[in-house]
Amino acid sequence: MSECTIRFAWVGDEAVLLRFIRELADYEKLSDQVVADEALLRTWLFDKKKAEALLAEAEGEPVGFALFFHNFSTFLGRAGIYLEDLYVPPTQRGRGYGKALLRCLAQIAVERGCGRLEWSCLDWNRPSIDFYRALGAQPLEGWTVYRMSGRTLLDFGTLNTIEKVGGENI
């Protein structure tokens, strides 16, 4: 592995993050779902601070990223970290950058007192599955990820559809 440094992304990194996001979406055959742009990333990552990103760099060039946020485990009674995306371009794979990003994220979880580090992986993505398993990660058997988005989320979450509990809107 070339000398690799990992740092938190900061304002001004939106273009490289967006490039990696688009490359990942292309790899996952989901390019049509990318609506993010630099302004949205700036707003949600740096202004609202709803997620964080790590950038891996080698010889001053970005070679991968990890985007994550905190979740919460009611069973553990504390926060965890959810890894939304981890991406290293194909030309940079096999050099340890993905492992370095995951190790850094695990260190952050430990330093912050988090109870776990979780992520999802597409069922067909055998190289990633093998990579995660080689690191000791285990799939959660018996769990299925559910999602509400787009029109379904808008319709379900519209104020006039919110049910009243005890006479007050929840």
Image (cartoon, grey):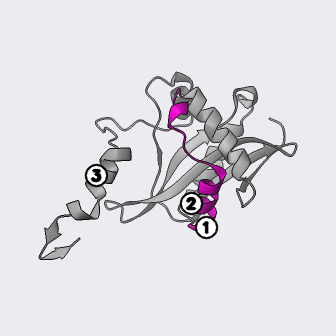
Helix, strand or loop under label 2: helix
Q: Circle 3 sits on which residue? A: 155
Q: CA distance from mark 3 to mark 2?
A: 23 Å
Indicate the position of residue 74 as horizontal and vertical percent values. 32, 62
Indicate the position of residue 93 as horizontal and vertical percent values. 71, 29
Indicate the position of residue 131 as horizontal and vertical percent values. 57, 30
Q: Quadrant of residue 159?
A: bottom left
Indicate the position of residue 103 as horizontal and vertical percent values. 63, 47
Left or right of 125: which side holds 8? right
Q: Circle 1 sits on which residue? A: 47
The magenta span reads: 29-48
- 9, above or below 36, in the image: below
Q: What's under tag 2, amino acid-wise?
A: Trp
Q: What's under tag 3, amino acid-wise?
A: Asp
**Proximity of marks 3 and 1: CB atoms separated by less than 8 Å:** no
Left or right of 16: which side holds 107? left
Helix, strand or loop under label 3: helix
Q: Circle 2 sits on which residue? A: 44
Where the C terminus falls, by quadrant?
Answer: bottom left
Task: Give the residue displayed 54% in from the left and 39% down from the top.
Answer: 34
- 56, above or below 33, in the image: below
At label 2, counting other C-alpha atoms closer than 10 Å, the crowd grade (few under 14, some 14-19, many 20 or more) is: few
Q: CA distance from mark 3 to mark 1?
A: 27 Å
Q: Is residue 170 visible?
A: yes
Q: Tell which circle, 3 or 1, labels the residue nearer the N-terminal end.
A: 1
**Proximity of marks 2 and 1: CB atoms separated by less than 8 Å:** yes
Q: Quadrant of residue 87?
A: top right
Q: Residue furthest bottom?
A: 167
Circle nearer the viewer, 3 or 1: 3
Q: Residue 136: which numbered mark, if any?
A: none
